[in-house]
Image (cartoon, helix red, strand yellow):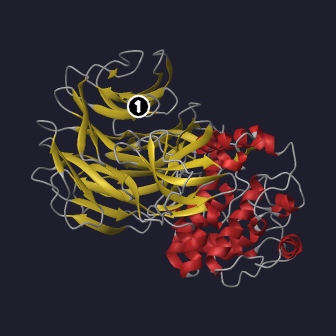
Amino acid sequence: MVELRPLRSGEPREVAGYRLLGRLGDGGQGSVFLGRDADGGHAAVKVLHPRLLGDERATRRFLRESVTAAKVAGSRTARIYGSGLAEGRPYIVSEFIDGPSLHDLVFDGGPLTGAELERLAVGTITALTAVHGAGIVHRDLKPSNVLMGQDGPRVIDFGIARDMDLSTTASSVVGTPGYMSPEQIAGESATSASDVFSWASTVGFAATGQPLFGRDSIPAVMNRILHAEPDLREVPEPLRGVLRACLAKEAGARPSADDVLAWLAGRTAAAPRGHAPRRAPHEPRGVRAAASEARQGMRWAAAGVGVLVVLGVGAGMFWRNAGLPAVEGQNGAPAAFGVELGPEFGPASGADVAAMAIGHHKGAPVVAYAERSGRSIEVWDPRVGEPLDRLPDAGPTPVRSLVLIPVGGRQTAVWTGTDGIVRRWRIGDARPGVWHQVCRSEARLASGQWRKQPAVVIGCPDGQVVTLDLTSNRIVASDRLATGPVTALAWDESTGKALVGTGRGLVGAPAGLLGKGEVRSVAALGDGRAAVTTGGSTAVYDLDSGAFERGFSTGAADVGVTAAGGRRMIAGGGDGVTVWNADRGERLGDLAPGRKVTGLAVGDGLLVVATGSRLQAWSLSSTG
């Protein structure tokens, strides 16, 4: 756990129901404390500096930070729980990331190398794709604003971030000198390209152990940023070439954050249209090398490629529709969509996968699955198709419903068998943890939250819906929401309630019963809408009014809803997998054409498909 300084005289003891345990650190606007609520949950509580009290401009700017950060709310950033005034003093409550800053980690332990450096680069650029996708410019990305949590890096501190439309209307020198872009130093408006420059400077610091433009006087550092090229010889390829492109002096010559993520994944060898022109010999050779090496098997961008998740993560999220067109192939047919992460993997020939889930473990994507006739849970790395861990005894009955959810910084599998018992296992542990007898027989699971803590919602054959708080290991809610078996479940973060599929439709929506027939799957879209699958089709409904918005022919296999690259997507399986834009109704493309799909799972912008006894994973963050 990070080091806490004891509270001093005059510092607050309690804010917004959180008892303050000590000070975590200080920033330009406020002090950050570790808070604990009545249920034992922790949060970071930022309070405006006393010297700024009474300064209306400082107060507005401080509170605007919570609004700005909440617009992002994606993976690799800290979630915002709330903000307001406590005894006239502004505060912001956010997710507590238990880990040192990148600055402190490198200062104490030296440069990052290998997979650790790769995870940092991908995790932080993934955060920038979410920030820029929400129309925000961070303006102060630097090593001290990257926290190295147990689940990977997180970008924090949106204190001087601005909406893109505002940041282009007024110029001012903002940022931290050693990590500012040339245009920021010149007093020009910061843009998303400025963040890309700061990202490259930050990753360069992690790779070399030194600021790329020196540690001496501020004028000297600024002069180098404006006129000198940094020494990147200690940065390994292919990352070196990517950083070189991002450190271009002219903002218009830099790639976007999405471009960088695509380059690291090896999905393109040159800047896409509308960005840096492809010019020899001026085009950075390292970019081409980055793509080439990545395609030959590195594929390490998958460690943080997911940007936003709807199904499978109970976290508050805000979405921005990028309005991207459908991808067309020859003769107007849908093109192949997504990028394969690695080879086929999974059980031996002839096996039948009963349950799958997607998550992250030690900063890398993982897929957990259980066979229909077996009693074990396997965890694999989809990038290389290799097993990572195995729980040989998952209980006396076969696994039927499975989720992956972080609990206390550790990725945890939670499942039920045909006996209705809910069990859990932290990946890496030798044996499973506590269990609860919840239902009398086979149950359904969905990830959720209870008072901002991870939880699972369980639907029973008798219509009972139970919420299990995974932090306290207590059943905290139980209601009979259906008269018959629960057939599907999802957690609606906007209402803090479960959406329950039954044999006659969806219950739990403010508008009442939605859809007709047995619900096979349901996913909350995060904005008062839900995707409900009955039979071979999926319909999107407004939960408040009950209005039908659009429908999709999703097939007879599983249906998943996720988001990546600024788009919410619906994926349906049968003969292959078809992917649609959930907001616009456009068909985006196909996966696994000509193959019989028996199941699929989505999460973190990834999709895993079961075809026969084998599994295959794709990234949906952009087209292939």
Residue extending farthest to the bottom is 233
**Relative to 251, 327 lies left or right:** left
Q: Please, what secondary structure does the residue beneath circle 1 have? A: loop
Q: Which x, y percent locates residue 565?
A: 60, 48
State which quarter of the image contains the N terminus: bottom left
State which quarter of the image contains the C terminus: bottom right
Is residue 333 visible in the rendered image? The answer is: no
On screen, residue 66 above or below 509: below
Count of numbered badges drawn on the protein: 1
**Relative to 375, 147 lies left or right:** right
Q: Read off the residue under disc 1.
A: 496
Q: Which x, y percent locates residue 530?
A: 45, 28
**Relative to 570, 271 lies left or right:** right
Quarter of the view holding residue 220:
bottom right
**What residue is at 50 percent from the left and 74 percent from the top?**
115
Which of 452/243 is in front?
Answer: 452
| Dot 1 amino acid type | Gly
Residue extending farthest to the front is 9
**Relative to 621, 474 lies left or right:** left
**What residue is at 75 percent from the left and 53 percent from the top?**
192
Which of 29/140 is in front?
Answer: 29
Q: Which x, y percent locates residue 8?
A: 54, 57
**What residue is at 40 percent from the left and 52 percent from the top?**
608
Which of 457/569 is in front?
Answer: 457
Question: Within 10 angstroms of label 1, few (less than 14), some, or many (20 or more) residues?
Answer: some
Q: Which x, y percent locates residue 196?
A: 72, 60
Is residue 622 visible in the rendered image? The answer is: yes
